[in-house]
Image: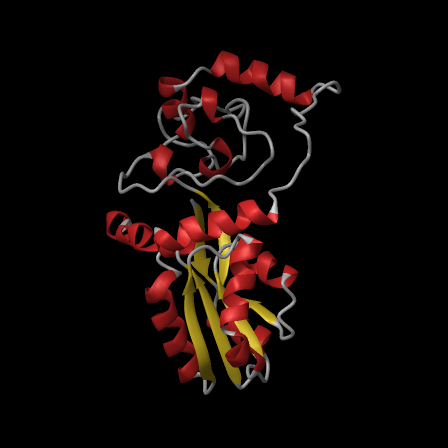
C-alpha cells in the first residue's frame, strides 16, 4: 500500500487560508490502512477543522481516491455540498490528490496527508516491513532480501555498503545508535548480484519494457469503480490487522 502520514496543523492552516466552509473526501483503501483515511480519518480531520473555526459541510469516505472515475463519481454525488464549500480537503496519498485536481472541482484542493512510501500491510517488526519504498525508480529488493537500503541506510547507499562497512562490527558507522542494515542485507540477500544490478541500471543501453501505451477505458474504470464499491466493507475489515 502507499503509506501516508498527516501534515502538520500549521501547514494545513496555511493551505486552507481563509476558507470557512470545507468538504472532505477520505480514501477507503491505502490511507484507511495507514490510519489516516477512512471513517476514522474523517472524524479526526473534522474535529481538527472545527477546532480551527471552520465548518465541515460534507465529509465522505471514498472507496479509492486514486482512480479518476471514482473521484468524479464522488464529486458528482456530493456536488451541491462541494459547491457550497470554499475548499476540498483530500485525505489520501498524492495519487488521490492528483485525481481531485484532474476532476477540476472548482474550489482549491487541499491535501491533508503526505505520501511517505510503499509498505506491506503487516504487523511484523522486521526490516522488510519497516523499510519504506522511496520511489527511486530502480528497485533492488530482489537482491536485498526485500529490505529497501535507501530508506534504512543513513549513508543512502543502494548497490553496496559504504566504504567503512564493518569497521564497527554489526553497528552502523554513521549512526552509532543503530545496527548496520547491510549486515542484515548480506545475510538475507546477495551483495555480488546487487553490485551487478547496479551496473545494469547504469548502462546507457538500459531500456524499460514498453507495452502498447494504452490507458484503461472508461468502461473498465466504471467496472473497477463498481467492484471496489461492492467490496468496500471487505477493505474496511482489513484495518484492525495493521493497528
Q: How many numbered marks have been drawn onto this rendered protein structure?
A: 0
Question: Which colour assignment does the render follow?
Answer: secondary structure
Residue under the image location 42 percent in, 57 percent down:
63
Q: Position of residue 84 (x, y in %)?
A: 55, 84
Residue 125 is at least partly visible in this image: yes
With respect to residue 124, does 235 lie above or below?
below
Q: Which residue appears at 74% of the width and 18% of the height?
A: 205
Quick check: 117 above or below 60?
Answer: above
Q: Is residue 24 left or right of residue 209?
A: left
Residue 116 shows up from this direction: no
* Nearer to me, 118 or 156: 118
Above-or-below relation of 104 to 163: below
Q: Residue 18 falls in which quadrant of the image?
A: bottom right
Q: Position of residue 127 (x, y in %)?
A: 35, 34
Q: Residue at x 39, y 76 (%)?
A: 46
Tell me the residue at 52%/25% (across/down).
140
Q: Quadrant of the N terminus?
A: top left
Q: Foreground: 177 or 202? A: 202
- Name the image quarter holding residue 135: top right
Outermost residue on the right side: it is 204
Q: Give the left or right position of residue 234, taking residue 94 as reference.
A: left
The relative height of residue 78 versus residue 212 in the rendered view (above or below) is below
Tell whether 49 sits left or right of 234. right
Q: Position of residue 129 (x, y in %)?
A: 35, 37
Task: Return the residue found at the far front.
Answer: 219
From the top left corner, tell me how far across and down residue 142 is, in percent.
46, 22
Residue 14 relative to residue 1: left or right: right
* Front in this rendered view, residue 139 or 1: 1
Amino acid at each position: 500500500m502507499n503509506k501516508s502520514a498527516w501534515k502538520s496543523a500549521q501547514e494545513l492552516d496555511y493551505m486552507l487560508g481563509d476558507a470557512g466552509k470545507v468538504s472532505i473526501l477520505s480514501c477507503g483503501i491505502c490511507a484507511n490502512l495507514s490510519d489516516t483515511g477512512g471513517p476514522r480519518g474523517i472524524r479526526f480531520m473534522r474535529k481538527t477543522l472545527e477546532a480551527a473555526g471552520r465548518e465541515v459541510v460534507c465529509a465522505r469516505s471514498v472507496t479509492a481516491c486514486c482512480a479518476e472515475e471514482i473521484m468524479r463519481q464522488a464529486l458528482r454525488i456530493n456536488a451541491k455540498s462541494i459547491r457550497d464549500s470554499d475548499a476540498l480537503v483530500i485525505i489520501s496519498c498524492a495519487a488521490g490528490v492528483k485525481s481531485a485536481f484532474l476532476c477540476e472541482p472548482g474550489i482549491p484542493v487541499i491535501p491533508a496527508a503526505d505520501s511517505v512510501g510503499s509498505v506491506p500491510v503487516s504487523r511484523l517488526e522486521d526490516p522488510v516491513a519497516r523499510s519504506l519504498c522511496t520511489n527511486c525508480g530502480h528497485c533492488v529488493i530482489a537482491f536485498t532480501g526485500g529490505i529497501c537500503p535507501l530508506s534504512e541506510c543513513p549513508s543512502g547507499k543502494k548497490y553496496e555498503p559504504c566504504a567503512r562497512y564493518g569497521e564497527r562490527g554489526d553497528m552502523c558507522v554513521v549512526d552509532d545508535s543503530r545496527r548496520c542494515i547491510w549486515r542484515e542485507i548480506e545475510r538475507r540477500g546477495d551483495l555480488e548480484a546487487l553490485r551487478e544490478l547496479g551496473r545494469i541500471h547504469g548502462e546507457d543501453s538500459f531500456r524499460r519494457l514498453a507495452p502498447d501505451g494504452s490507458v484503461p477505458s472508461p468502461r473498465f474504470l466504471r467496472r473497477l469503480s463498481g467492484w471496489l464499491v461492492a467490496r468496500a466493507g471487505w477493505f474496511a475489515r482489513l484495518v484492525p490487522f495493521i493497528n
